[in-house]
Amino acid sequence: MASSLFEIVELPGGEFALQRSGEDGEPLVRIEFSEEARVYLLDAGLDVARAMIDAGIEAIEKLGVDSGPDRQQANRRVLH
């Protein structure tokens, strides 16, 4: 299986997105901060988005979740 490179980018609307490098497709993850949060974060929005994505990846690794399509339906969870 070929490995992909990923990048975190800021979208025109102010959201941050995780996407495959060099592709214009739909992002894998989007993070949007409220206006109040953006004021609080100042210029640290990208750093916080990166930390959130890193934490999500670590959580998946700890859970040992299989990413196959059959398992995605069986392991559907809602996190708040």
Image (cartoon, rainbow, N blue to C red):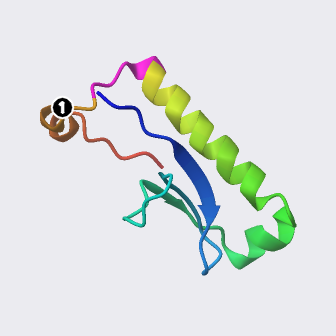
Classify 73 as above or below 12: above
Q: Quadrant of residue 36?
A: bottom right
Mark 1 belongs to which amino acid?
Answer: Arg
- Is residue 69 found left or right of 46 in the rendered image? left
Q: Which region is colored magenta?
A: 62-66
Apparent side of residue 58 relative to residue 37 in the rendered image (left or right):
left
- State the residue position of label 1: 71
> Residue 7: x and y, percent?
58, 50
Q: Residue at x 31, y 41 (%)?
A: 77
Other-residue count near label 1 (Cα within 10 Å), few / some / many at <14 / 14–19 / ≥20: few
**Residue depicted at 50% across the width and 41% down the height:** 5
- Pick whichever, 80 or 22, lies toward us: 22
Which residue sits furthest left? Answer: 70
Please provide percent x and percent y for residue 31: 56, 61
* Residue 64 magenta: yes
Is residue 1 depicted above or below 35 in this figure? above
Residue at image position (47%, 18%) is 62
Q: Main secondary structure of the magenta part?
A: loop
Total number of numbered labels? 1
Q: Position of residue 26 (x, y in %)?
A: 37, 64
Q: Is residue 11 magenta?
A: no
In this rendering, the answer to whether 77 lies above or below 44 is above
Q: Residue at x 18, y 31 (%)?
A: 71
Quadrant where the N terminus is found in the figure: top left
Label 1 sits on a secondary structure element that is helix
Q: Quadrant of residue 34?
A: bottom right
